[in-house]
Image (cartoon, rainbow, N blue to C red):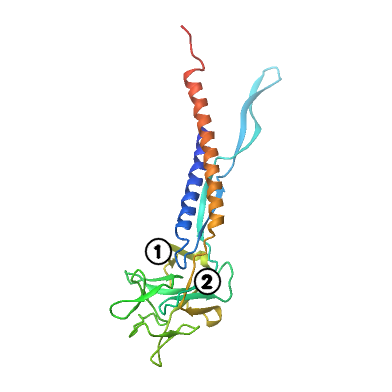
Amino acid sequence: MLRGFYTAAAGMIAQQRKTDLLTNNMANSNTPGFKADQSSLRAFPELLLQRMGKQTVPVDNSFTIPSSSLVGAVNTGVYMQEVLPKFLQGDLQETQNNTDLALQDLNPNSTSSVFFSVQDKDGSVKYTRNGNFTLDGDGNLTTADGLYVLDSNGKKIRLDSVDFTVDSNGQINQQGRRVATIGIAYAANTNSLVKEGDGLYRMEDNSALPQAPGTSFQLKQGYLESSNVDTTQSMTDMLSAYRSFEANQKVLQAYDHSMDKAVNEVGRVNG
């Protein structure tokens, strides 16, 4: 019976974590460049149950030998194995703001993607799809959170004003001269990226991503990439997770009621 408690509780914990994930996705449905997380639920390894016993050997000096018979397999619960971002291209929305930039994958697939390179506050290089940029007081191109946007040489990009143009390859021109080329990083395997929050990613081993080939992306000025969260599907999945949580909760209550009966009523000696 105690195994039933653990199995039902494991199901509740897994569905609660899935609900938290879906809630976070929906909360960021309007965040530019946000990539929805997707979860993978997996069952704990099954246990093979056997009934242990003994048999008496029919001989003059009878003796017993241990024996076992197969009962069957039992599952011990479920858990959330991993959470991975879904790097599908989001829709592009026009903003007519010169400092807004959007990346469009020219060879979209499930394993690779391109990113803007930015410098975190600790000096490390991180990657993002959020192109909602601005200029700080010194004229440096930064993210909305104040992180420096890097060029193809890993340097900060400094501009005189917001009056500049960016071509499809990321080249910045201002007052008729080339200022810099925006650093676009290429991840051949997005599963090797670690999500850090605020739309930032890094490599698992903290290594740097290579520059993206020009044939893999197109950059559009005056646009922002929308979140790729499917709110309708997320709401459906959330209701399904809630129902599963509720079902496990009822199973847990049933086990609790049975345990109460066993402790307080079974074997009671009437005076």
Residues 251 and 235: in front is 235
**Residue farthest bottom in this picture:** 176
Any part of residue 1 in sight:
no
Q: Could you classify mark 2 by the number of other residues whose Cα lies within 10 Å: few (under 14), some (14-19), or many (20 or more)? A: many
Q: Is residue 162 above or below residue 201?
A: below
Which residue is located at x 50 percent, y 56 percent? 83
| For marks 2 and 1 on the same chain, the one whose residue lies earlier in the sequence | 2
**Residue farthest left in this picture:** 137
Label total for image = 2
Q: Position of residue 248 (x, y in %)?
A: 53, 38
Residue 198 shows which numbered tag? 1
Which residue is located at x 38 percent, y 91 percent? 175
Residue 113 shows which numbered tag? 2
Q: Position of residue 249 (x, y in %)?
A: 51, 37
Any part of residue 137 in sight:
yes
Which residue is located at x 70 percent, y 17 percent? 60
Callout 2 amino acid: Ser
Q: Quadrant of residue 232?
A: bottom right
Q: Quadrant of residue 157?
A: bottom left
Q: Is residue 168 above or below residue 232?
A: below
Mark 2 or 1: in front is 1
62 to the left or right of 210:
right
Helix or strand or loop: what does disc 1 sit on?
loop
Helix or strand or loop: what does disc 2 sit on?
strand
Q: Is residue 20 above or below residue 253?
A: below
Q: Position of residue 167 (x, y in %)?
A: 48, 85
Q: Position of residue 118 (x, y in %)?
A: 39, 73
Callout 1 amino acid: Asp
